[in-house]
Image (cartoon, coloured by chain):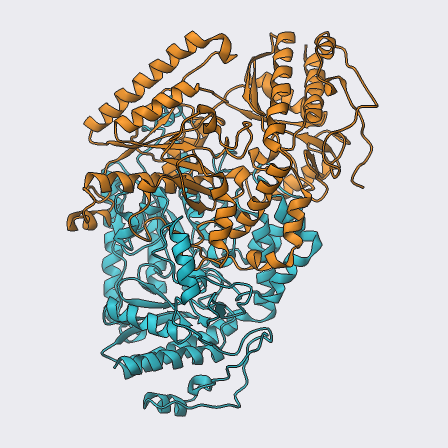
Chain colours: A cyan, B orange
């Protein structure tokens, strides 16, 4: 049942210049003997039975449409039958999934290690009795934090707060920065009676006119605080009241980065200058910048990269102006760039004041430097404060990452993927451009959004499920168990689609 | 192991005027023969080994304190050993829990029905593979919504959106109201280019100056949007930027409600008048009220009630002024008032436009009338959009509520509890006052906060764990499996504490 038919092993399967040349000429090298390198429990290859969405998905879409807006639903899934990198839908189609639930499945579907967590009777109570962690934590809570989240803490950070999702993580990270900033301003004295009174009615000085500086193209979530720092797509923001907070340009770099070093450095300098100007301007406006929030790679906004030098200088600007520096690793965290955190590529000892996470970490939350710890209880608080059952899964995910050297796998697969994307854009320069990536966190642009969407639908019908971002970008967000073997499946399908598109 | 020692069955165990008189005289009728009415799997009574927090809790507090602010932590729990209404801590103390993880445990600890959900192999995949529900829902998602959330939908509502927690539910409910309001204003035309452009930089008209009207004493969550409608305690709001949104007075009623009908009606009329004034005033300020948000009983703010007549008139005011009416049932929902939703006590066919929930429902989310459905995909969206594993538990909770007639149990226990609180406040008028409640959603005020806190600590050391709210209120939030038998345990312990306090 598990290892069904398939075995369409193809040219990209062995990375060699010979095969790349072969491929570049448009031919397709098929080898029946190539062995797969993925875990035993996985499928071999995609297997398609219908166009997607198939008839069963369409019927379910109709049913769900009576209850919710289903305009964003691709198809309905059979999660029981999905395995590793392969997502199975309700019509029996099996797709190579390189979008992984918007980048939130760390080690593939139904990983045996996670199944074990579920069937261990010692864990049942953790699932059945969700505690209010802030008031009544379970006995093993400190231990579980130490063996999971603290074992991967960013440099300089020993404190972590779990939350239910990415938006809540960023909202509470912002609150942490605001509280820290005002405590500094007050000289750590108690708030005045006037502050206490005015905060109850949303007025200054109790609710001060502080701001968070964010970047054009950023995505930090959709709750009202987060949304004021999100600037990726109008559909996210239209009609929702917001804060007058400063928005800096994010560098628009040319790719491959190593070929445009000088031009990119100029562009980054321009953006950094603008950041400093905005900080000064907003201070003069009476809305000082308490914190700067940024993604190591802008994901939803179109997979926009910046150099380690840019981030290092930005971190210094934050320090110089007394702003907290918040790195949002909700999408970049968890190993997908080849290091556990995207910011590790910057090589800084003190990369940030706050680092938030969610998605592949399974629990939301944020780390922060000691200096930013809340001075009183109940300032950072809610009913659940996360979910210990997610910490259980995370511990096991981290074990698997270590045991199976998945960061190395990501680095290796990422190189093969990016190399393959370079080859494709050379072969189809009128369709593809700007291939870029770090680890398997890769992307490539289509010539326009209609072409991008058409490529994605055609690829899906051939068994490759990808994501989109920005205006015309395809983003690749495979799980950490995505091996070179899968890279070649991906590239072959993409090549077939592009060959037909020509 | 499960049914250990105990059997301190006491006077309140049989509700009779004789015993109430007996009790009122300060004596304590002890019966070894009384049978317990709770499920077989539960313990009989509290059993205390140490003061709380005991030595093990204190050591764990020290450990967790290195990682997080632990100022709000009461003690550490042994959830494996907890059963039904009894919470066991790491020092082996077993307490009658009438706070239930801030009112979020619907049918007690380790209910056998929920254990079964966990051990059913068909459910494993739902826990292990958390989907991005908005794009790739599981096959059974519509069915699970129909058998769980839609089976308890508030009157007039057939659409529901799940979310991860209460704050996210309210944030997205607010967004839904803003989108609905602007679509109305625009005559359902497409947004202008100017709106699309300005929304990307947080400016009007794309991010319009709309507001949500809330009430003093309200609690709707702690993310920035929710926090702008929360006005219960300064510690929640201090130092966090907010919106200039209108805040109406919530009626300050006298209890018991039936004894102060005329006075209370006057007070409610005053508040309703103020609501209309604020709506007009904020429209004139250029910040029209898109929605009104209110709790059926203000919980965190001090268990403040209002009459069905008040809510009915408020709902009409919302309709008259074109504001959406959002009832926040995060704490009142799930059966604790004796009806599934707190707003059912108003007796309205069309009680609200939006009803949000979380806590006892195990999943967050909100219902809304068809008219408020988002016009386009991705306007209400995030990565997870809830968690289907919580829907699995919710289905089973609803089965138990129906099978065990738990709404009747709540009504019966609630009457006994409120009657007992009346008796206590008659007996200790210098300490207690303003007993009030609906179902087991009961509360009583102490003469001041220090006395309240002292009563709670003493009760905890005798095996009764309660919650606080408002300035000097004790709140009772037992699970739905809280029987009259447990009411009497509660009242006896409270009586002992009060007798010593005198």
Splitting the image into 4 quarters, where does residue A210 fall? Answer: top left
In the drawing, does residue B448 fall left or right of residue A265? right
In the drawing, does residue B207 fall left or right of residue A396? left
From this view, report whether residue B73 is shown above or below residue A255: above
- Give the quadrant of the N terminus of chain B: top right
**In x, y percent, where is residue B484?**
68, 24
From this view, report whether residue B251 is shown above or below residue B361: above
Q: How many marks?
A: 0
Closest to the observer, A61 or A296:
A61
**In x, y percent, where is residue B431?**
60, 11
**Residue occupying image coordinates x 26% and y 40%:** A283
From this view, report whether residue A24 is shown above or below residue A84: below
**In x, y percent, where is residue A320?**
34, 48
From this view, report whether residue A24 is shown above or below residue A382: below
- Give the quadrant of the C terminus of chain B: top right
Tell me if residue B75 can be seen: yes
**In x, y percent, where is residue B174?**
35, 38
Closest to the observer, A64 or A329:
A64
Closest to the observer, B246 or A156:
B246
**Residue occupying image coordinates x 44% and y 75%:** A48
Tell me if residue A142 can be seen: no
């Amino acid at each position: 049942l598990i290892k069904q038919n398939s075995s369409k092993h193809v040219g990209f399967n062995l990375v060699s210049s010979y095969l790349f040349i072969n491929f570049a000429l448009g031919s397709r090298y098929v080898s029946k003997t190539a062995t797969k390198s993925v875990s035993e429990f996985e499928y071999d290859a995609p297997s398609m039975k219908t166009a997607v969405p198939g008839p069963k998905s369409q019927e379910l879409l109709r049913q769900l449409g009576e209850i919710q807006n289903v305009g964003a639903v691709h198809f309905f899934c059979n999660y029981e039958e999905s395995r590793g990198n392969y997502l199975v839908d309700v019509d029996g189609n099996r797709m190579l999934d390189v979008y992984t639930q918007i980048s939130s499945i760390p080690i593939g579907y139904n990983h045996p290690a996670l199944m074990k967590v579920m069937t261990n009777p010692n864990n049942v109570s953790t699932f059945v009795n969700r505690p209010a962690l802030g008031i009544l934590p379970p006995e093993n809570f400190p231990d579980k934090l130490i063996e999971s989240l603290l074992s991967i803490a960013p440099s300089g950070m020993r404190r972590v707060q779990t939350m239910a999702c990415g938006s809540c993580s960023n909202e509470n990270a912002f609150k942490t920065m605001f509280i820290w900033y005002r405590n500094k301003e007050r000289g750590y004295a108690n708030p005045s009676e006037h502050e206490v009174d005015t905060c109850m009615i949303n007025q200054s000085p109790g609710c001060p006119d502080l701001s968070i500086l964010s970047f054009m193209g950023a995505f930090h979530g959709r709750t009202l605080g987060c949304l004021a720092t999100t600037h990726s797509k109008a559909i996210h923001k239209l009609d929702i009241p917001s804060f007058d907070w400063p928005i800096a340009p994010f560098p628009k770099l040319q790719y491959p980065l190593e070929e445009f070093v000088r031009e990119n450095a100029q562009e980054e300098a321009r953006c950094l200058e603008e950041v400093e100007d905005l900080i000064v301007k907003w201070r003069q406006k009476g809305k000082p910048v308490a914190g700067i929030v940024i993604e190591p790679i802008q994901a939803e906004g179109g997979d926009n990269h910046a150099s380690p030098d840019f981030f290092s200088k930005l971190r210094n600007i934050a320090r110089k102006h007394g702003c907290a520096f918040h790195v949002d690793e909700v999408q970049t965290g968890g190993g997908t760039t080849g290091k556990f955190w995207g910011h590790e590529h910057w090589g800084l000892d003190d990369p940030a004041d706050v680092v938030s996470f969610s998605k592949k970490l399974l629990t939301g939350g944020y780390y922060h430097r000691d200096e930013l710890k809340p001075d009183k209880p109940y300032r950072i608080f809610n009913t659940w404060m996360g979910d210990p059952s997610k910490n259980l899964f995370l511990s096991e995910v981290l074990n698997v990452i270590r045991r199976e050297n998945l960061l190395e796998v990501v680095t290796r697969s990422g190189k093969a993927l990016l190399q393959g994307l370079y080859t494709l854009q050379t072969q189809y320069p009128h369709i593809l451009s700007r291939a870029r990536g770090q680890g398997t966190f890769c992307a490539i642009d289509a010539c326009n959004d209609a072409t991008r969407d058409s490529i994605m639908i055609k690829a899906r019908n051939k068994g490759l499920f990808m994501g989109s971002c920005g205006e015309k970008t395809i983003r690749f967000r495979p799980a950490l168990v995505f091996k070179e073997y899968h890279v070649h499946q991906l590239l072959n399908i993409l090549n077939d689609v592009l060959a037909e598109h020509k």
